[in-house]
Amino acid sequence: MSVGDATARPCDEEGNFLPEGTPPGRAETRILGDWTPYNSQDEFELADLLFTRAEMSHGQVDELMQIWAARAAREGATTAFTDSKDLHDTIDAIEEGDAPWYSFRVGYNGTHPQGPVPSWMDDSYQVFYRDPRQVMRMFLSNHKFDGNFDYVPYREYENNERKWGDFMSGNFGWKQAQDLIAEDKRTHGSTLITLLSGSDKTTVSVATGQNDYYPLYLSIGNITNQIQQGHEDCVVVIGFLAIPKCEREHEKSDAFRNFCQELFHSSLTTILEPIRSAIETPEVVRCPDGHFRRVVYSLGPYIADYPEQVLLSGIVSGWCPKCTAHSRDLDGDSSPRSTQLTDLLCSSFSSTELWDEYGIAVNVHRPFTNNFPRANIHELLSCDLLHQVIKGTFKDHLVTWVEDYLKKKHGKAGAARIMSDIDRRIGIAPLYPGLRRFKKGRGFNQWTGNNSKALMKVWLPAIEGYVPRDMIRAISAFLDFCYLVRHPTITQRTLQDIQDALDRFHRYRSIFQRTGVRKLGSKGFSLPRQHALKHYIEHIIAFGAPNGLCSSITELMHIRAVKKPWRRSSRLKALEQILLTNQRLSKLSAIRRSFEQCGMSQDDCHTAALKEVGLDAPETEPNPNTTDGVMNKNDDCGPVGGPQVLNHVVLARRKAPRSPKDINGLTRFIGHDMMVLVRCFLFDQKYPESEIPGSDVSLNLCPRFSGAISVYHSAVATYYAPSDISGVGGMYREQIRATPVWNRGESSVPRYDCVLVQVCPEDDGFRSMQAACVRLLSSIKHKDKTIPCALVEWYETVGNAPDDTIGMWVVKPEYTGNRQRQLEALQRVATVVHLDSVVRGIHLIPVYRKQQISQKHAYSTTLDDFKQFYINKYIDYHAFETVY
Ligand SMILES: [Zn+2]
């Protein structure tokens, strides 16, 4: 369901709507073979390699060209560029992707005090920016977004249930489009383009000191989340704001603080000013599908951390920028903040009352959004998974509170001993693709968001036994919340689950008060970042799934737009060099797209050159990273390109070297009678409908086996997991290993990964599966058929529901024989299963509870040393969704 044909109608270059079905015109493309400003493809490829990927310094480029020139002189040839200046001049001559930098200066123009004047009052501050309309045109002309670009806001339903995913599925875009189209004829038929912005200071530090930069980023909500996360052209740095400096004695003064705020808001107003006219009057722009459309802009969500949100919304620190809840009782009663409400309150109360009772900082410059139609900063402040959930509530609150609890209960020395044991528990968690190994526990020098995300996966079972059960329940509820809000698509049902997880979290977190870790009463949990969790549901309804709008996107941009360009600068007037580098990167990226669009860079430059002179292309090995189902030897997991396909598991391409070649050798090697297991498996394959499985029928009834059997050390599981780091189609893959020698760093260890095997397809979630450890990956040749299969040792499920404290399923190794027998006589129950029944790999983490871990314990034997394991649903988002 969409707003309908009243929006997003294609038009011609003058803005006249086209009849329905008119195909898009081609962009003013190049003549085939025109590599301007380069002479040839190899020149362009070299420039792109040196500048974008190798990031080679001026000096090194000069040196390379000199070496090349020497060789060229001998052979009577020429070099691609004479020196680094020539290389840069050619990049600057690229017309595509040109969004030049401008700047303006701002200074204090208020009253000066009597006596000595602080230096900041006399300084002027330079702000750099790009024209947002030019940047928008650059965005919209990117044909790579075609197919992943929503022109029209929509409401999606599945089984009568509303579904939210990409930004345009939310109510915000819908409402803006309706306002626009229903009420104003000038904008009828136009396309709504929603601007996403974000600002955040970042520091680059060197031994001699540090430099702070304040980039402002821009993106658009029309690009789908899939692309938003995986594509580097989705976010552009559009400004560098000024950071006023002053003597320490004046830092806290009201005058300086007010000036900083005024500078911030007036800079944003000035930078975004060109957009304002196109908020109400459409302009004609070419879109990713090649059509021209009349577009209208609107200011959309703003991504910022809490201090930045305070600055943006003009509230008092400690209050919520989105609602009026009192700072002493943030999770209590409240109503939404808005510009109108602030105006009303300001006209009714004194500045002290406003400050104390409503958290409104009256002296502060009014938010920049007040200068733009249809923009309410309180509504636009986006929720922020990284700062509110991952760094805030998890790391700064829960992890710290658990440590505080241990110190209160056991004293400093006792707590230190326990925390060391917790560290060891984390350290011996079995290996899993993509799981960071915490070799020495978690004594990180610097807590990054990635460290916190990695810890989230293994922390909860590690603290169990050392903290009260309600603490486990509170943290489990919080983790559920965290994984739920990271879903790529959220249904009304998910919203209920989110609310339920949040309610459970609020209910059980009072254990931190009962144990004296937090103050009693509402003050104990009046924490702005934790309170923000309450606003997630309204955020999802308005803006779609939160993982599309997360400050980890801006954090990633810091590296590309600030930190890397800074590192390659000469440090003298570094900002100007950073600006230039960004501009050159945009140009190279845009010209590559232009070449691709004209079909000019289908061949690599060597092949193209050979074809040009009439020779055959050289035979090349396929790139292992791009071939479906085959991964780089050292990569355990990673995104896969291409469209969404059904989940599947395939054997590695290479057979295992030095493995037993015959079935008797395999039996000795693996410790299970392979002939029996293979024959039972063949029975299951032959009689899939049989009520009795092959393992329970007489061996005489099972087919005889005399074929070949080949062993593999790994398989690749590919599945749809769009909110983890996945390819553009949302596909993700991971290695499943079964190998006696797995090399990692200094030592080699056996590695037998665990998997989920589908056993009762008619059930849901984990009830439809059984956990197993893969002992052998093989293919069996039987009667001209080659069957990929796995020998697995089973885990039996404990109980018929997840553990009611930690919320995870418990399993234990399954043995043959009965209890009267000696333990030595017991053998793991094993079966050969078809690889098609393997759903994916899964992480098993020991149920530690009271058990202390010795220093000598090695992670490689963890799966053999414990009696029970949790099915770790927190290992990744897809597991959380699958194992319920
Ligand atoms: Zn609030």
Image: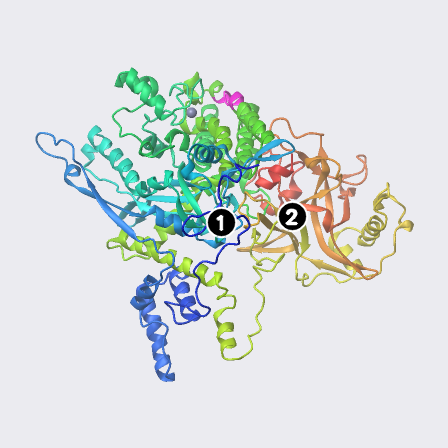
Q: How many C-alpha atoms fall within 10 Å of the one at disc 2: few (<14), some, or many (≥20)?
A: many
Residue 508: in magenta span: yes
When asked about the image quadrant of residue 180, the answer is top left
**Disc 1 residue lies near ligand 1 with CB under 8 A:** no
Task: Identify the secondary structure beneath mark 1.
Answer: loop
Identify which residue, 491 or 702, lies in the foreground: 491
Query: Could you tell me if residue 619 is visible in this image?
Result: yes
Residue on which the image places disc 2: 753
Q: Up-down: is 843 above or below 39?
A: above
Q: Nearer the viewer, mark 2 or mark 1?
A: 1
Residue interval drawn in magenta = 506-512
Residue on which the image places disc 1: 18
Mark 2: which amino acid? Answer: Asp
Q: Are marks 2 and 1 in contact (CB under 8 Å)?
A: no
| Residue at mark 2 to residue at mark 1: CA–CA distance | 58 Å
Task: Identify the secondary structure beneath mark 2.
Answer: loop
- Tell me if 775 is positioned left or right of 877 in this view: right
Q: How many C-alpha atoms fall within 10 Å of the one at disc 1: few (<14), some, or many (≥20)?
A: some
When asked about the image quadrant of residue 844, the answer is top right
Secondary structure mostly taken by the magenta-highlighted segment of the chain: helix
The quarter of the rendered structure image containing the C terminus is top right
